[in-house]
Image (spheres, coloured by chain):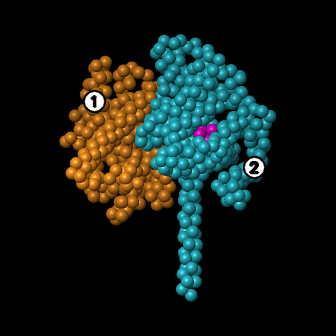
């Protein structure tokens, strides 16, 4: 990309917004600009970015997956139950990630093999996975497994599963130097996803499917395989987000992340992805996630109640899309104008 | 007649009856009239949301803000009652709140051109936040209890609200059937550009679809507050997804243009009945969502399989016909009139 092109890009605008936001919040409250605080406060919201990065790949194909928020809870409760059952924590993590990827792959299989709208499929999966996540503990009770507590496994549904080992909660609370682990994981996932999207055939396939899945199929793109893979990747990202959140809260719960849907989709759309597919960038999503997250932190630090935050996030979502539409209209008008002028000059020259 | 039997609404209705009957083999109490009436009564809230949602989905949109709109209307309803407004005026206030909420969505989608899911997701956050800001996050509890009188009044042991709902459904069904502008919803959803070329005001049609969804959400709020007698913060939380699930289950296509009010009614009944059946089967309530999700998935996949079979059969019939006519011409020594795709390309 040429340098001037970069300065005009949506990502650059987002980076500018992020800098301005931090400066403004820092001017109002200097304590906000403490680097260590700033870095560690990301742990509150990076799960949104992780899930949003996965969703960016899906939205690139013109699909959508709203079941990610349920997969977060499902992965969390699977990890917790595995741990309670006495499995080593490493094995529990792998199982939770596998369940998440499997759930995503199942979404992808149904979407790829049928012509049912992805929104409908993942809406059903949203209910299905969150139902399984809340139901699993009671299922274990009914099957006759014994839990340590008096309330049986059902109690875990309300209390969450605590007592997770240090080696696991380190993922949520630990860090390397000044950089907290959740942020490191997020950056890792974003870098891998960005590489997949811009440097591999798979990434080009995603874009091609997003532009037109018919054309993609006739061009020889393995549409079904690509779709199943991308939804599986999204499930994996959601599971990672769920585990990071579990480690951060030091408690495995089935309803973790259920509130995050608005923020996740806002991050993707604010990041420059088109909901119709074919357009979007992981870097944009990452930056938009940071903008949103710090905005929330800053507002809370300024003493604004958390009730106002969703109002602002919602308006930001609508406003950013409206802005893009407005810019598009202006651009078209300008292009039409220029075409008209050149045409008129050509006619004038020929006539003269 | 055959058309009704073949419709998706009928399929789900049959499923509903089969489900209730099969649960009845385990627990007879399901078939007591009072149980069935209670299921009807508790489905009213979701049904109203679903009917509103239906208008939007018919025009190929989606509205994920109806739950939040209902919550906001409920808060306004509560405030109005606490301010001493008479019940009818308070109801009107709730309806108008819903209508305005829907109009905002309609403006953004129809006139600005924001994709429906983005617009309504944004207002979902905005309305829900607004609801908490207005109430300061606490429940509205000290509502004059006379509003419950509306909910507990029964004629022929069926609640007044259910009768009202029946009337509303019949009126809306008649209007959708007989009123010309009502058909615009179908036309716009089926083929936006075609509807535009026919001279239909497509933007206005989409605008009113969202506005109606908001108004129905306001009505749902009145029902909800009337039934429980206070306004909890969770009013309508997550119900927008249930409402979408209900209309899709009942056969309204998200691609627009197909479906009827019966889809919304039967879909909402089914999802509510599933919850009740779980109780009769003594399954823990935590499984409700899993069953609802599974049913929705099973129905849409089954529907896809039927459609594919029908399409394949039709294609096979046409191919056979083409082959036959080709053979006929070959037999007569004339050149084949039906060209195969390979020949043309």
Q: Colour of chain B?
A: orange
**Residue that appears at 54% across and 20% down:** A155
Comparing A60 with A13, the one in front is A60
Q: Colour of chain A?
A: cyan
Comparing A8 with B143, the one in front is A8
Q: Which residue is mark 1?
A: B17
Question: Foreground mark, 2 or 1?
Answer: 1
- The location of residue A261, given as percent across then percent down, is 54, 40
Looking at the rendered image, the quarter that the C terminus of chain B falls into is: bottom left
Residue A327, located in which quarter of the rendered image?
bottom right
- The location of residue A23, given as percent across then percent down, is 74, 52
Q: Residues within 10 Å of mark 2 (few under 14, many from 20)?
A: some
Relative to A186, A55 lies left or right? left
Q: Which mark is residue A106?
A: none
The magenta segment: A49-54
Q: Is residue B133 visible?
A: no
Q: Which residue is mark 2?
A: A26
């Amino acid at each position: 990309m040429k340098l001037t092109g970069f300065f005009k890009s949506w990502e650059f605008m987002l980076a500018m917004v992020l800098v301005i936001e931090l400066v403004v919040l820092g001017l109002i409250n200097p304590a906000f600009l403490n680097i260590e605080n700033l870095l560690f406060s990301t742990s509150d919201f990076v799960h949104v970015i992780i899930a949003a990065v996965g969703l960016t790949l899906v939205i690139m194909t013109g699909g959508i997956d709203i079941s990610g928020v349920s997969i977060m809870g499902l992965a969390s409760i699977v990890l917790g139950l595995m741990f309670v059952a006495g499995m080593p924590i490493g094995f529990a993590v792998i199982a939770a990630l596998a369940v998440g990827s499997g759930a995503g792959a199942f979404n992808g299989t149904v979407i790829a093999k049928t012509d049912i709208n992805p929104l409908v499929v993942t809406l059903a999966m949203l209910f299905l996975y969150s139902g399984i996540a809340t139901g699993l503990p009671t299922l274990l009770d009914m099957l006759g497994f014994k839990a340590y507590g008096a309330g049986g496994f059902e109690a875990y549904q309300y209390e969450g599963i605590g007592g997770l080992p240090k080696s696991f909660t380190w993922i949520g609370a630990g860090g390397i130097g000044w950089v907290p682990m959740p942020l490191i994981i997020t950056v890792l996932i974003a870098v891998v996803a960005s590489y997949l999207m811009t440097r591999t055939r798979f990434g080009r396939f995603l874009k091609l499917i997003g532009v037109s899945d018919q054309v993609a199929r006739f061009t020889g793109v393995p549409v079904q395989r690509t779709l199943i893979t991308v939804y599986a990747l999204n499930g994996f990202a959601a599971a990672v987000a769920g585990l990071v959140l579990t480690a951060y809260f030091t408690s495995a719960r089935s309803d973790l992340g259920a509130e995050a849907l608005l923020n996740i989709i806002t991050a993707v759309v604010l990041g420059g992805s088109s909901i119709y597919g074919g357009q979007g960038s992981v870097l944009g999503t990452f930056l938009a996630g940071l903008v949103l997250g710090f905005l929330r932190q800053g507002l809370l630090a300024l003493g604004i109640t958390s009730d106002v935050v969703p109002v602002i996030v919602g308006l930001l979502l609508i406003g950013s899309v409206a802005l893009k539409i407005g810019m598009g209209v202006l651009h078209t008008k300008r292009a039409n104008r220029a075409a008209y002028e050149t045409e008129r000059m050509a006619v004038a020259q020929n006539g003269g | 007649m055959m058309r009704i039997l073949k419709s998706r609404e009928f399929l789900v209705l049959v499923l509903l009856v089969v489900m209730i009957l099969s649960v009845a083999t385990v627990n007879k109490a399901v078939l007591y009239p009072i149980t069935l009436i209670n299921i009807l009564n508790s489905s009213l809230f979701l049904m109203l949301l679903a009917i509103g949602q239906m208008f939007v989905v018919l025009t190929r949109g989606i509205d994920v803000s109806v739950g939040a709109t209902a919550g906001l209307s409920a808060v306004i309803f509560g405030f109005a009652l606490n301010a001493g407004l008479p019940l009818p005026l308070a109801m009107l206030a709730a309806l108008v709140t819903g209508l305005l909420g829907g109009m905002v969505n309609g403006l953004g989608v129809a006139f600005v051109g924001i994709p429906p899911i983005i617009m309504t997701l944004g207002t979902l956050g905005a309305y829900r936040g607004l609801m908490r800001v207005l109430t300061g996050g606490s429940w509205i509890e000290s509502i004059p209890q006379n509003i419950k009188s509306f909910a507990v009044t029964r004629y022929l042991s069926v609640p007044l609200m259910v009768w009202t709902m029946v009337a509303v459904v019949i009126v809306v069904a008649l209007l959708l059937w007989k009123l010309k502008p009502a058909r615009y919803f179908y036309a716009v959803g089926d083929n936006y550009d075609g509807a535009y070329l026919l001279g239909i005001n497509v933007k206005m049609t989409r605008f009113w679809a969202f506005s109606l969804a908001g108004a129905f959400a306001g009505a749902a709020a009145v029902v909800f507050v009337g039934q429980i007698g206070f306004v909890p913060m969770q009013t309508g939380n997550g119900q927008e997804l249930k409402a979408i699930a209900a209309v899709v289950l009942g056969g309204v296509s998200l691609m627009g243009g197909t479906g009827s009010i019966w889809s919304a009614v039967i879909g909402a009944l089914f999802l509510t009945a599933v919850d009740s059946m779980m109780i009769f089967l003594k399954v823990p309530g935590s499984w409700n969502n899993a069953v609802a999700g599974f049913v929705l998935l099973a129905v849409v996949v089954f529907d896809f399989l039927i459609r594919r079979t029908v399409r394949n059969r039709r294609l096979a019939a046409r191919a056979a016909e083409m082959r036959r006519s080709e053979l006929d011409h070959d037999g007569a020594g004339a050149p084949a009139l039906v060209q195969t795709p390979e020949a043309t390309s």
